[in-house]
Amino acid sequence: MDRLQYNKTVNNLGRVMVFICVVAFMLPAFAISAVYKTPIDWGMVVKAGMPLFLTFVPSAIAENLSYAPILGSAGLFVACITGNLGNMKLPAAMNAMQLIDENPGSEKADLASVIAICSASVVTMCITTLGMIFLAPIAAPLLSTPALQPAFNNMVPALQGAILFPMLARNPKGAIMPYCLAIAALLTLGRSSYSSNQGFVMIGVILTCVIVTYFMHRNDNKK
């Protein structure tokens, strides 16, 4: 099989598998709705999903266009189906290429990439499964103790603080703006309205920050 025929076969098979996985992802929601006779509120689905769609579709397109030459067609399909491209699949593929001393784009590099990505996916699923079977019964009683509940109740503020202060130290003017805009939106809309429309608020904050940051850096470059 030549390379053109190989890529065509991989693309056809990959599209079928992606379609099957998308159906499998949505199947539990429809199954629960059918079993418990609970209708799906499509208006709520669109309202909750549209901000995520508008946020992640551009990044997904950019990821696929940028990762395809590195991971190869087969590796890209497997990585997109199993997820965690930037943190696990891309480093695994790059490490495999370095071990065989091949540059991205060659046949050997594509083969090493798909083997590394599949291996990383299998290892992740095995660790997750073993953790669910053996670690959950041990960790559940420990994590549910009253002494640890204050830590879990304040986990989000702790994470926000850990993320915010390093960003403030590197770029104070650019980092403080998203938080100020989000707080202003909360005070303007009110807690209830903000909670139900936070996805659209997030998109508005992102676009505003991009525009303002662009003009800030353009003025700095002129100076």
Image: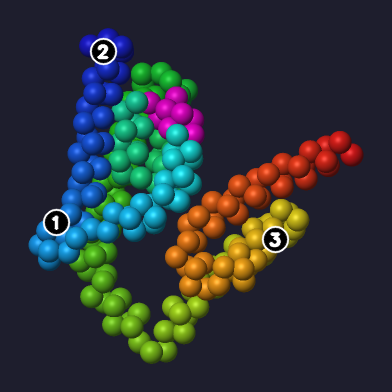
Quadrant of the drawing holding the N terminus? top left
- Looking at numbered disc 2 in the image, what kind of residue is underneath it? Gln
Please, what is the three-letter code of the amino acid marked with disc 1? Ala
Q: Main secondary structure of the magenta part?
A: helix
Q: Is residue 195 left or right of residue 7?
A: right
Cα–Cα gap, marks 3 and 1: 44 Å
Residue position marked by numbered label 3 in the rendering = 176
Which of discs 1 and 2 lies nearer the camera? The answer is 1
Give me the residue at 26% from left, 71% from top. 136
Please name the residue that numbered disc 1 is placed on.
31
Pick the front one: 181 or 17: 181
Q: Looking at the image, tell me whether mark 2 or mark 3 is earlier in sequence order.
A: 2
**Location of residue 3 in the rendering, given as x and y in whole percent from the top left corner:** 31, 13
Q: Per the image, is 10 magenta?
A: no
To which quarter of the image does residue 137 belong? bottom left
**In the drawing, what numbered circle is on residue 5?**
2
Task: Kindly identify which numbered label has been placed on residue 164.
Answer: none
Q: Secondary structure at mark 1?
A: helix
Q: CA distance from mark 2 to mark 3?
A: 52 Å
Tell me the distance, in whole angstroms, between the alpha carbons under discs 1 and 2: 39 Å
The residue mark sitting in front, 3 or 1, is 1
- Per the rendered image, the range of residues in magenta is 62-72
Q: Is residue 43 visible?
A: yes
Q: Are marks 3 and 1 in contact (CB under 8 Å)?
A: no
